Amino acid sequence: MRELQIATEEVVAWFVAADKGTYSLIDIKYEHAKQWVDILANPIRRCYVDDATLETRARELNLPRSVVLAAKLPDEGATMAGDFGEVLVYLCQAALEHPRVAFGAKKWRLKQDRTKPAPYSDVVHFILPTWPEASEHDTILCSEVKTKATPGGEPPVAEAIKDCAKDRTSRLARTLVWLRDRALGEDLGCVQLAQLDRFINLIDYPPPQRRFFAVVVACSSLLADTLARVPTEPPEAYKLLIIAVPDLRSTYSAVFKSVRHSARPIEEPEVTP
């Protein structure tokens, strides 16, 4: 949360989970979702590019910051919806661990193509309470996220569960190696190489814990249909989390519009097409 410059206590208030036996439900309040347009603009911008890099590139290229930022952000559509769901789960996953500190790489900064999702596991957090000393409480959190803003298409619960299994068998391991490779030539922010090695090499004692989540971010209007697809038996290898967001499509569209405007200094006029 510190790197995104957003108050942890504020985020924790959004994500109140109710245990429903086979799954957990977070029903976002309408008033909270409406606040996101103002509150999340800068933090989401920092998920794609940190402030210093944005300022430096704009100055080096003699371009407005908004132009540099636009080259990072997804267009309206499926990728924007998916990115929003992932960022929301990034915030949620850290909030649910509070007061323990969960931190992770901002994978959206590492995209090769802004029009496509970031590769490998969707959301990864690390918990290292006694770092640099190894601890039995060292934990990696990994979430597979499916975002459902409109009716139709594949059932998101089944898809989230299926792809969560990929994380558990091999994809998380590939994600960590990919992050380490990227860290050799790029700044991953708050994540250090040695911290990635703690979960890649598995040589330090005691061994770290691994926790997996299948997460569905769904429009509140689709909640009943989403819950109808929840398994009747509680899962053992992962946890299923449903996050219901009021007016999800209009919410993420308005938030990303605000993100685009967040990079424009006061003296930089808005260009109207």
Image: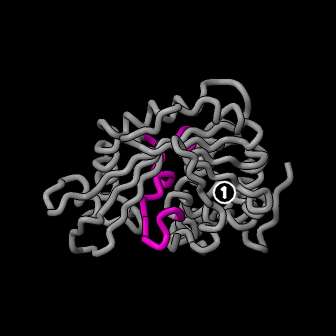
Please give the residue where the numbered disc 1 appears in the rendered image. Answer: 67
Q: Circle 1 — which element?
A: helix
Left or right: 178 in relation to 123: left
Where in the figure is residue 201, as x and y percent of width and height?
18, 54
Q: Is residue 123 above or below residue 228?
A: below
Where residue 9 appears, as percent x and y from the top left, is 60, 74
Q: Residue at x 51, y 74 (%)?
A: 2
- Where 209 falls versus 241 (above or below)? below
* Count of numbered circles on the image: 1
Please tell me whether residue 173 belongs to the stretch shown in magenta. no
Is residue 189 positioned above or below 180 on the image?
below
The image position of residue 156, as x and y in percent, is 58, 32
Q: Residue furthest right?
A: 272
Q: Residues within 10 Å of mark 1 (few under 14, many from 20)?
A: some
The answer, for residue 112, to whether it is visible in the render is: no
Q: Which residues are magenta?
A: 95-119
Mark 1: amino acid: Val
Left or right of 186, for residue 132: left
Type of secondary structure dominating the magenta stretch? loop
